[in-house]
Amino acid sequence: MTSSQPLLGVPRDAEVPPKVSVLKVSVIVPTYAPGDRLDRVVRSLDAQTMPEWDFEVIFVDDGSPDDTWQRLQHIRDTHTNVAIERIEHSGWPSKPRNVGLDLARGEYVLFMDHDDELYPRALEAGYAMAARNQADVLNGKETRTDQSKWAIEVYAANIDNAIDRQDIHPLLPTNPHKLFRREFLMKHHIRFPEGRRVLWEDVFFALDIAPHARVISVLADTPFYRWVRDAKTASSSYGDHPGEYWHWVREIVRHANEKLSGPALESQWRLMILYQYHRRVLLRLDTSFFGAPSQELELVKAIVEDIINNHIPAELDAALSPTELGKAALVRTGRWDLLEKLVAVDAGLVGRSTTTSVRWMDGKLRIRAESRWTGAVGAPLAIRNDGDRIVRDLPSAVAAALPYKAVDMTAALASAHTSIGIRARDTGVVWMLPGECEPGVTTAARPELVVSAVATLDPSTAIFGRPLDEKSWDFTARNDFLGEINQRDLRTSLSARSAVRDGHVYIAYKNAAGALSLDVDERRRSLAGSAPLDPNQAASFLTESMGGALRLLIRRMPTSSFELPFTGVATSDDTEIEGSVTIGRASPEPAWIVAREDAAWLQSTVQQRAGTYPITLNFHDREMDSGLHVTVGARGDLTFSRQTTLR
């Protein structure tokens, strides 16, 4: 798209903006050759429910070599709340963010990447909560396009002030997709570290914030930011150079130790260091770690040993899972030879979940599932019975070098957890469902971990007490074991389960990938296709007729009413859904899906000459084949059949 083409249509000048003394939010967007991805950012800003006169957008171009500057000029010229700035290429988002911060006028600032999206109510809901709590930081619900599991544990509930949170550091995830009080940043001289490549510059930014913040609010019930991962970016290149990767991990740990020192920040320090220890240190010590060239590997080993031995206190190892503890213990003793054998045993750990039951009960969908954990390529877990304990099945030399807590798996198996959620197919928003689970270990010769889970979906309250707000959903199972979390599609082999409730049609079905999905109001699945109409239980009666001679004279056709039950549709209230039915090529007739205590019925009328005709339905503005034909008799009597062809 060239700069002369409109990006998003006409300027938004339909309303006369009031005089605003202080802008509520400044959105700062650094750009560098974003291409058409920039359109996505602007569309999401234009879709904000916050009035445009309450926020500004500042694009800072980092010396893009293409037509980005011309595109930004066009955006500025077609919007009343956009400012643009251009700087010499710095090579990293830090400097353009800092330039944008100096230009910002809003009470709060938000840093967006040039290819991401804000959800429509992000600024309105985020600012309202931040202002109400006088928050230094507003951490809004974020999703990530390539990970259903992303930050789910962070956004379990709205929290007015999470500063003393004990389960997770209040600034996690540490990316800058949050609202920051501008005066707070200025007062404490907080900026992003500048340089050609400063890996995890946002983590350093967060660590500079942490000692000074007094109120950090968490907005969990409203989608805020969508991190789009659809191409290789600077952050996806972090693993390309192991030496660089580990250098910056060490710098993060050092910075955390420095910034979060002292008794008042001890809890925050512990949570942040444990997060870095797990995610950026121990998780990276896998089979791929040992695939680096020998010279580079020796250099990296020295950095890892320095991080673990000199910057992460050994007492934190007590919080590790057995697999993590084993890695830490071998690094602390310099046994890299044994560590390579250990990670080979642990490779490929994954939990896969399958439904065992899907039922509508009292208007709610009840789901039961089983999750089975395996090793590489579906191999059994490397565990065995040892008296009344279950231990890791390791090479003898490896087992002998580990503390017993790194070998004994009994407690870890008992704490394995599975929960079920739903992910909106269009927007990627994930909501977890209420439920419970029970881990169990089979008593076979080689023990197997199986977690049984149950969850309930109430369509009217599924989103923090609000009804489902999108039409297509996919179910996911979140499996947590040994510090490993995977959230994958929930597999199913069951046929469709349909319900009519509160004026809506809900269809739980197996999608093309073999996983459980939910259709709302027949967007992708029709009720007739998922719960066929039963021609054998049809009822009909003639509602309008005329005598033979008169009828022939004016050629009027009889009108007959009918009702057909859908098979296997759960109902919980008296619901009517309006649509239409077309008999053959006649004009559409009004029709209704009517829910009763016993079943759901299709009700409509037929006005046709004698003959056999296909029945086409139209509900929720979607035309669909009913799967039936109706035969109209000479006197208007109706017979329904599941014929597939007409002669």
Image (cartoon, rainbow, N blue to C red):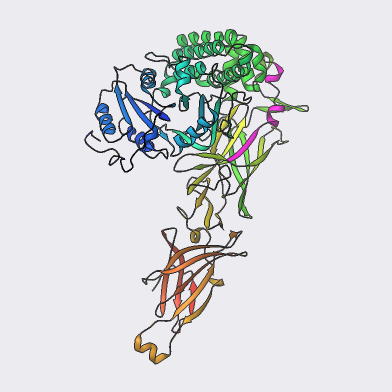
Q: Is residue 131 visible?
A: yes
Residue at image position (61%, 26%) is 483
Q: Residue furthest bottom?
A: 549
Q: Is residue 446 magenta?
A: no
Quarter of the image where the N terminus is located:
top left
Q: Is residue 635 above or below residue 422?
A: below
Q: Is residue 33 visible?
A: no
How many numbered markers are drawn? Answer: 0
Q: Residue furthest right?
A: 388
Identify the magenta region.
403-420
Quarter of the image where the C terminus is located:
bottom left
Q: Percent from the top left, x then y, of residue 440?
A: 70, 36
Nearer to me, 140 or 298? 140
Q: Is residue 619 above or below residue 120?
A: below
Q: Say which quarter of the image contains residue 82.
A: top left
Please indicate whether residue 254 sits to the left or right of residue 44 in the image.
right
Nearer to me, 403 or 54? 54
Q: Percent from the top left, x then y, of residue 414?
A: 70, 31
Q: Percent from the top left, x then y, of residue 52?
A: 37, 36
Please indicate whether residue 471 sits to the left or right of residue 554 in the image.
right
Please indicate whether residue 52 sits to the left or right of residue 472 in the image.
left
Q: Is residue 410 magenta?
A: yes
Q: Percent from the top left, x then y, of residue 610?
A: 41, 80
Nearer to me, 447 or 544? 544
Q: Is residue 355 above or below residue 39?
A: below
Please indicate whether residue 116 sits to the left or right of residue 137 in the image.
left
Residue at image position (52%, 47%) is 468
Q: Is residue 392 above or below residue 638?
A: above
